Amino acid sequence: MENQSLTKQIGEKLKKLRLENKLSLDQLSARCSVSKPMLAQIERGASNPTVNTLWKIANGLGVSFTAFIDAEQPVIKKVNRSEIEPLIEESGKMKVVPLFPMEPGKSFETFYIELEPGCDYHSNPHPDGVEEYLFIEEGSMTLEVDTQSYIISSGESLRFTANYPHYYRNPYSESCKAMMIIHYPSSIR
């Protein structure tokens, strides 16, 4: 898979996961609230899914976000985030770089994220038991979880249960750069 584009890799993995779960495109569409034509385009590698769309599909299949981009991992792996193709949210103001996808036997995945000024990203609730850990490297963001709002800035960290709607916002004049770990319960692969 190393020479294939990320879009094609996501499409192939989506189709494999859908077939492993014995789901038609219609059935998956009903589970994840993503249209059948969009799912078909993603599977063919004809459409690059947004972060939000990929989360909906992952939740519908009961898999991790990085299940679509994982590959067999060596014992030691060094990554340079500038060499990883980022996922860009539809507004273009949020960049997600999957650093360490979830691997068999592990229950977490690690991302680098950047929120540009004016970013207002809504994340749908994740399955019960999923937790997110944020570590702010530069700048600040406002995180809203359910009805609570938190401002987190450079040097600060925050952990929350992610089975509520949550919003990542950057109302500030500088970019917010952060590391994120998503921890999954054992029921999610």
Image: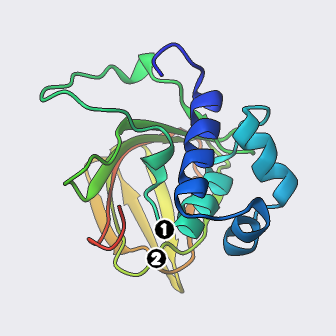
Relative placement, left or right, of 28 versus 161 is right
Q: Determine the residue located farthest toward the bottom in the rendered image.
A: 147
What amino acid is found at the position of numbered circle 1 in the picture?
Gly
Q: Nearer the viewer, residue 168 or 180?
A: 180
The residue at which mark 2 appears reads as 127
**Rendered residue at 36%/72% (across/down):** 130
Give residue 61's quadrant in the image: bottom right
In this rendering, which labeled residue sits more in front, label 2 or label 1? 1
Can you give x and y, in whole percent of width and height, for residue 125 in the image? 54, 75
Give residue 139's quadrant in the image: top left
Quadrant of the snapshot with the C terminus: bottom left
Residue 62: numbered disc: 1
**Rendered residue at 32%/48% (across/down):** 102
N-terminal of the pair, mark 2 or mark 1, is: 1
Q: Residues within 10 Å of mark 1 (few under 14, many from 20)?
A: some
How far apart are the alpha carbons under marks 2 and 1?
A: 8 Å
**Rendered residue at 55%/42% (across/down):** 13
Q: Please determine whether, in this image, residue 50 is positioned above or below residue 7.
A: below
